[in-house]
């Protein structure tokens, strides 16, 4: 019955694709207010209709093409072998690198990136991540940290301002503590930033597909401001409705094919 159930497999795979697509959309909507968040976009799902086939020419010169089902069968004395794949496949999702809206806060520890690039941050275990989140804080040691406690990295490591009463970040990344330069924020870019792996809400990790981090020579920052998520609620809602309709259509196709298969079994038996 494998040959007869190909429609079931195709409909089921289409439903699985839309489930994943919905997960991507709902995650974007959940992070619409997350500072520096980069929305994920589903790549065009691939629809595979790969049919291995054999071609033979009859004695009268007429060409005959035989598609190969996943089991051996004979058709007018001709043997067709090999698989027939028919399914919708989810390829991947990627990060949208378009900038978000910059919101002025006048907080001296807030800074937004003007152009490409990511801040470098480290967790307690020394793992390095990259982020556009620029609403920084100071920990008990006077180090610049993110909201989730990761230390912000400068050219020489963590940036510490000590017990300074006046801290300022300049548009070139320099950090001043009571008027003295104590460090500088460093920005990094990647050959293929869309492939950065999302860790948590707005932290990103480099991988082979994204390429290694490269320092930005002349970083441009907007002090006293933060960059919001580049998520459009209206656009994501439209994507959600589209995915739901496709899912419902595939579900109806699945039920219809299941009913027809049941009728076929009742009429001809299982043999």
Image: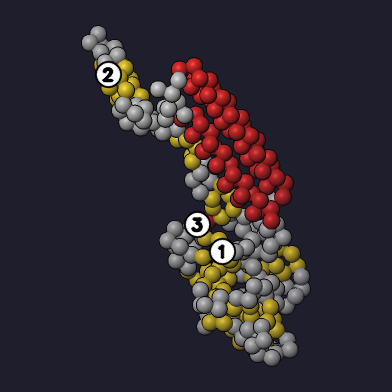
Q: Is residue 41 above or below residue 133?
A: above
Residue occupying the point 40% across, 22% down? 271
Instruction: Kindly indicate the quadrant of the structure image that contains residue 177.
Output: bottom right
Q: Please give the label number shown on residue 108.
A: none
Q: Is residue 229 above or below residue 12?
A: below
Where does residue 26 sit, x and y in percent of width and height? 66, 51
Camera-nearest label, 3 or 2:
2
Horizontal relation, residue 147 to residue 271: left or right: right
Marks 2 and 1: CB-CB under 8 Å? no
Residue occupying the point 52% across, 77% down? 125
Secondary structure of the residue carrying tag 2 is strand
**Residue at the disc numbered 1:** 199
The residues bearing labels 3 and 2 have C-alpha atoms spaced at a distance of: 48 Å
Q: Residues within 10 Å of mark 2 (few under 14, many from 20)?
A: few
**Residue at the disc numbered 3:** 195
Please report whichever mark, 2 or 1, sits nearer to the chain's N-terminal start: 2
Q: Residues within 10 Å of mark 3 (few under 14, many from 20)?
A: many
Task: Locate the N terminus by quadrant.
Answer: top left
Please report whichever mark, 3 or 2, sits nearer to the chain's N-terminal start: 2
The residues bearing labels 1 and 3 have C-alpha atoms spaced at a distance of: 12 Å
């Amino acid at each position: 019955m494998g040959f007869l159930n190909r429609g079931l497999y195709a409909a089921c795979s289409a439903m699985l694709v839309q489930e994943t697509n919905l997960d991507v959309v709902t995650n974007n909507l959940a992070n619409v207010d997350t500072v520096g968040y980069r929305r994920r976009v589903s790549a065009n799902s691939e629809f595979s209709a790969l049919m291995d086939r054999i071609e033979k020419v009859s004695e009268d010169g007429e060409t005959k093409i035989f598609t190969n089902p996943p089991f051996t069968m004979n058709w007018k004395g001709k043997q067709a072998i090999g698989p027939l794949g028919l399914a919708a496949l989810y390829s991947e999702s990627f990060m949208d690198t378009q900038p978000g809206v910059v919101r002025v806060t006048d907080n001296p520890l807030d800074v937004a990136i003007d152009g490409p690039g990511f801040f470098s941050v480290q967790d307690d275990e020394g793992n390095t991540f990259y982020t556009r989140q620029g609403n920084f804080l100071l920990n008990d040691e006077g180090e610049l940290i993110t909201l989730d406690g990761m230390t912000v990295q400068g050219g020489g490591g963590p940036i510490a301002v000590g017990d300074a009463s006046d801290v300022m970040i300049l548009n070139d990344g320099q950090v001043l503590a009571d008027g003295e330069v104590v460090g500088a924020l460093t920005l990094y870019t990647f050959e293929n930033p869309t492939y950065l792996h999302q860790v948590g809400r707005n932290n990103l990790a480099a991988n082979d597909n994204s390429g290694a981090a490269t320092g930005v020579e002349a970083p441009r920052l907007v002090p006293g401001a933060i960059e919001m998520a580049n998520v459009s609620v209206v656009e994501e809602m439209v994507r959600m409705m589209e995915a739901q309709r496709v899912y419902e259509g595939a579900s109806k196709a699945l039920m219809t094919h299941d009913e027809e298969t049941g009728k076929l079994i009742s009429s001809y038996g299982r043999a």
